[in-house]
Image (cartoon, rainbow, N blue to C red):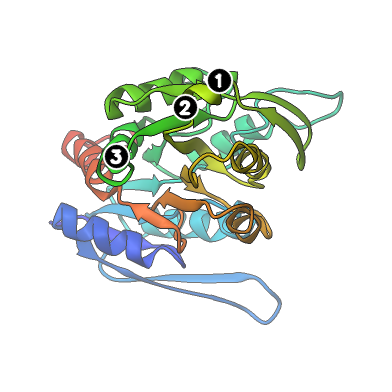
Amino acid sequence: MRPLVVPLPGNEDLARSLALGLDAEPCALEARYFPDGESYVRLDGPVAGRQVILACTLDRPDAKYLRLAFTAAAARDLGAVEVGLVCPYLAYMRQDRRFRAGEAVTSTTFAEALSSWIDWLVTVDPHLHRRTSLAEIFAVPAKVVHAAPALADWIGDSVASPVLIGPDSESAQWVSAVAALAGAPFVVLDKVRRGDRDVEVSVPQLERWRRHTPVLVDDIISTARTMIETVGHLKAAEMPSPVCLGVHGVFANDAYDALRAAGGARIVTCNTIAHESNGIDLTEPLVEAIRQFLESGARRT
């Protein structure tokens, strides 16, 4: 039987693209709230004996997690032979150690909880800051889709004479890989972060790249403070209008409008989180990663 692709609310476009790429059967999910605020979910299709693929990106995760857990549990209870999760943006990766006494290490707790409901996970460039692999915290197999090739292709097709700019020293390896694929030079910012919205940056070697189009590249655009500060430096240096390129466009609060207002930057993100800035499609590599799981049958024993 063909696999079922089930979209959690807000993930209908993602699910539709995956179903087409996999030749899978779409399955609608009825989801609503009871008057007291509790969630109701119902899979509107035959589940027994099927491989079920849940499509749910996890930006703003607190409002999404319970519905995801309930849907996964319902699929298994209804006889699904396998329940996989396609989660292009994986939340709760930031707090990977205890920075202050008494803090919860939420990345570990969230991974353990999510692992209890699914058989496998496909995601895109998770924020592995102090970890080397998702296997350190997830109890189920996971495949990571890397956006670097798609970013490089987009830069090659869309930007004349680019110079890539990475947000900090920790991004150097990642940005250098995109730059190498795009055949472009790169520099890395000198950054001091004093708080979530208090960032000071300097851009080295600006004079050398004055005739190039700056392409600011980051895995996650959340508050956008680093990009906003950098755009200001580039504008003051009279460089061409920059491109702000992100894998995951989280855009917390007014971040998108603030970045747009910062100095004429073009903003482009991958379609890991549905947003008007989406310009880079990762459906093909996601489908390939999912297909590997479907063919191997990575289900619970």
Q: SS of the residue at dot 1?
A: loop
Which class describes the residues within 10 Å of circle 1: few (<14), some (14-19), or many (20+)? few
Q: Under tag 2, what secondary structure? A: helix
Distance between mark 2 and mark 1 Cα atoms:
7 Å
Q: Nearer the viewer, mark 3 or mark 2?
A: 2
Residue 273 position, x and y percent, is: 46, 54
Quadrant location of the C terminus? top left
Residue located beneath label 2 in the image:
209
Mark 3 burial class by Cα count in 10 Å: few <14, some 14-19, many 20+: some
Q: Nearer the viewer, mark 3 or mark 1?
A: 1
**Mark 1 is on which residue type?**
Gln
Query: In the shown orientation, is residue 108 left or right of residue 212?
Result: right
Whether residue 26 is situated above or below residue 199 in the rendered picture: below
Outermost residue toward the bottom in this view: 35
User: Do the CB atoms of the residues marked 2 and 1 lie less than 8 Å apart?
Assistant: yes
The residue positioned farthest toward the right in the image shown: 101
- Residue underneath mark 3: 150
| Badge 3 or badge 1: first in the primary sequence | 3
Residue shown at 29%/39% (left/top)?
A: 150
User: Label 3 amino acid?
Assistant: Ala
Q: Is residue 242 left or right of residue 51?
A: right
Q: CA distance from mark 3 to mark 2?
A: 24 Å
Write down the residue under mark 1: 205
Q: Quadrant of residue 285?
A: top left
